[in-house]
Amino acid sequence: MIAFIIQRVFQGAAVVLAMSLIVFVGVYAIGDPVEILINPDADQQTREAVRQSLGLDKPLWMQYLFFVKSALHGDLGTSFVFNIPAIQLILQRLPATLELALTATALAILLGIPLGLVSGLNDKRWYSRMIMAGSILGFSLPTFWVGLILILVFGVWLGWLPVYGRGDTVRFLGVEWSIFTLDGLRHIILPAFNLALFKIALFIRLTRAGVMEVVNQDYIRFANAMGIKKARLLWRHILKNIMIPIVTVIGIEFGSVVAFAVVTESIFNWPGMGKLIIESINHLDRPVIVAYLMVIVVMFVIINLLVDLLYAGLDPRVRLGSSNR
Amino acid sequence: MSDLGLNSGASPKFTGPMRVLGDRSERLRNFLLEYAHSPIAVAGGGILVLLLLIAIFAPWIAPQNPYDLASLSILDSRLPPGSESYNGYTHWLGTDGVGRDLLSAIMYGLRISLSVGVLSSLFALMIGMFVGLFAAYTGGRTENIIMRIVDLQMSFPAILIALILLAILGRGAEKTMIALIAVQWAYYARTVRASALVEREREYIEAARGQRLGHFRIVSRHLLPNCFAPLLVVLTVQVAHAITLEATLSFLGIGLPETQPSLGLLIANGYQYLLSGSYWISIFPGVALLITILSINLVGDRLRELLNPGMRR
Amino acid sequence: MNAMPPPQPVLEVERLSTVFDLRAGMVRSVNDVSFILKRGEILGIVGESGSGKSVTGLSVLGLIEPPGRIAAGSIRLEGRELTTLADAEKRKLRGNAISMIFQDPMTTLNPVLSIGRQFFEVINAHRKVSYTAALDEAEAALVQVGIPAARERLSSYPHELSGGMRQRVCIAMSLINKPAVVIADEPTTALDVTIQAQILYMMQNLVRDSDVSLIWVTHDLSVVAGLCDRVAVMYAGRIVETGPVEDVLGNPRHPYTRGLLDSIPGDAEPGHRLRQVPGTQPSPLDLPQGCSFRPRCSGAREECKSELTSDQVGPEHFVRCLFKLGGD
């Protein structure tokens, strides 16, 4: 177990290092932020001064070494645009994104899994067909367009819910939260639902497929032949089997929700790091881009590690470190 | 998964490529008949064909050339659906912020969206197919390394990879294509390798090796035809993904340039008018995008049912 | 056994018909089947796959689900009619008064629940007991079916046990609530021959030591010969011959039984080719009129197209054939 964790941590570190190289070379080798940052009429001398102050005059490999050294000290450069440390900028925006992503994931679980169960257990019923049709729609609707429709319907036409920003926040555990104020809660409903929609469809399909596979297994027939009650059969014998793959998928999909928050945040002006990265790409604010990508990669590596551990903890057939599966 | 699954159950176990070539037209007919058992899939297929025709013939059937600046008038801007322009023409879907006929803009946008989606998927298919076959055919360490890369890439969401690439490359049509290809190739590689692995163990590949056929011939005549069915399914799914992703990226302003207004860009352009009530500029291109993706997914679902490549998830 | 007074039948199945309504038509999987099972007795039901032997077992347990249904007949367990019971009532009997052992032990146990937990589930479905009390009971049951280190096994998961071990666990589980009847559906088919012999021997002892009655569904006549008291031979949904094992196997009166016996390798003379029953079973959608075995029977005549009855040819020995093979 320990060996497995150590091995995975090293693997993760290798991935992070490789990504840092790719991202750094890519971002710093192409494009010139000076062109954007300073007045086009400025003379060559001013340009050189800015260039030097940003460290852009050094060879690329020196820039990278310097970057890695600083990164290990928690310094990923200073935003060209905001003139504050990039990592600080990202971390400021991180709670808003995490809050949105967690709420969306919770919504997806609470809606997707029960609907999937219902449609999997009563495969042929009309409402199961409706649920499945809904999930196909959920797969086909582009997230950003659904966001527009939500804004149009609930914001513009009905005027029920706010469609801009986070609303009131309250400080809890040192972080600002929207979900603990009524106004903030009203603000998070639409973006969270928007972000959750695709995952709801996904969880419906996964749960349904899992149920339909498990109910036909011999061990369920045997449990049925042993007189175990229907409710217990469902909760203990069926659900535990399908939850193992689903829990791991939830873990993996959480990462994807964080990534897709880029879209939802941009539409709903949610002040998270997703909105920030789009703005930074448009402004060629390289340190922020690099910092965002590094934070995201580290996050993914951690999520994947946690998912692996979770899977091993849930499924007795998986024993980490040994090869028997 | 053998023999493309077209004659499910009825065919014998051993089905080499000879059979596939032998009665192809008959099998195609059977396949289409079977496909037609699902009315909703037929409807999806019909709509898809219609959309493809619109996209191909857009310059000839669109009521207006939306990018001929001479024909535009600022007086016509933001007309609601069904209005008449000042020179007497009816805009059934209204006009956008600069007075473009929205119906025409959508037809042209569809052309751009579909061509970017289909082209990038086909490129990715070729790359993925080559990599997957190469991995399956060489085996051993090379295969291991390639598949590790594939797995690693697939553990990151597509939009993140596209974001990284576009952050590096910047906005532009070719750059968007590169991002879309980079996002997709791994899916094809994994699919091709998976089916090639199954086929690799079959007797007829051994037989072909025994006859000392050239590597190229073994791959192209024996491995490849049997990867066809799962590839077709993945291709439909991926085209839908690529179109959605391109629209998303363009909407965010980091995808296609303003000079190539795909459906995503049309939606983005309408976004600024949404809050002021000119909903149609954003909504109608969105409906067109939705119908496109929905029809592709319906066809893809039916193909998956019929061809059942036995993919995980 | 003959010296004892005739035991009371614990299970009576009368004119049972189980059908499946498929799109292609109605399949009569079990057609007018009657038999009784006495206390402490082992009844073998033999037949080819598709003969309806497994469906008979599932019907008795009330496990037929749509599109299948019990179309006619009666099943009485200790005098109580089962076919008219509500689902909840049937569920109370299953695993309790009547239980089942499945064919493939590798797939019969839930992979994500420990053995002890699965025992608890089966016990707790019918009796309120604490988890630890259930484990004690389970341990005793595992010892009884010959599982070493039974206590430790309770915390194991199915994948940690061998196939033979898992089948012993399944057997112990099916017996844990002291059922009157156990239906075993080819429980040794998936196992190695040596383990099969051990399990057969163990089952015989278990039945002898308790007063459970056993229905052993199998396609293997040699198992029947070694294990069962009585046998029913099924063909295309009907019982074609039934009676005490010595009578039916020693002196078969139905051509199909004869054919089955002739195709056992052990009985053939060395160097001779094995005989087999020519042809295949008829499609269940399109059964021949009259005797279903007629198309494969060398002695078939025109009269075989008429409806048949089951005729008694000896003590408890019945045959459904117009031209019975010549007795002694």
Image (cartoon, coloured by chain):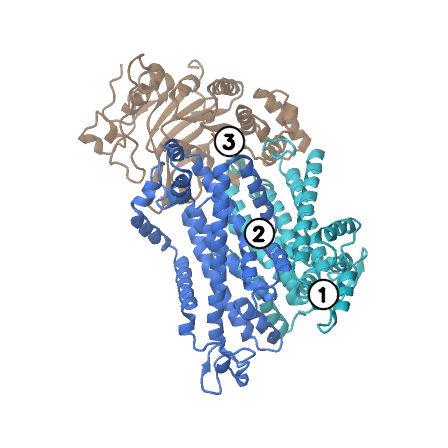
Chain colours: A cyan, B blue, C brown
**Where residue A322 sits: x, y (%)?**
63, 31
The residue furthest front is: A44
Q: Which residue is mark 3?
A: C99
Quadrant of the rendered image containing residue A276 = bottom right
Left or right side of A180 for C200: left
Q: Quadrant of the C terminus of chain C?
A: top left
The amino acid pointed to by label 3 is Ser
Decide which of C97, B90 is in the foreground and name it: B90
- Horizontal and vertical percent for residue A284? 68, 63
B149 relative to B140, above or below: below
Towards the viewer: C182 or B17: B17
Q: Residues within 10 Å of mark 3 (few under 14, many from 20)?
A: many
User: Is residue B237 at all visible to an observer of this figure?
Assistant: no
Spatial CA distance of label 3 from label 2 is: 36 Å
Q: Amino acid at mark 1?
A: Val
Pick whichever of labels 2 and 1 is earlier in the sequence.
Answer: 1
Q: State if disc 1 and disc 2 touch (CB < 8 Å).
A: no
Q: Which subunit holds the residue at mark 3?
A: C
Q: Quadrant of the N terminus of chain C?
A: top left
> Callout 1: few (<14), some (14-19), or many (20+) C-alpha neighbours within 10 Å?
some
What's the mark number on residue A203?
Answer: 2
Pick the residue in front: C125 or A312. Answer: A312
A199 to the left or right of A125:
right
Indicate whether C130 appears above or below A200.
above
Tell me the mark number nearer the camera, choosing from 1 and 3. 1
| Amino acid beneath label 2 | Phe
Query: What is the quadrant of residue C268 in the picture?
Result: top left
Tell me which residue sits at (65%, 60%) in the image. A262
**Chain ID of residue with mark 1:** A
Q: Position of residue A141 (x, y in %)?
A: 54, 62
Give the alpha-carbon distance from disc 1 to disc 3, as whole Å: 80 Å
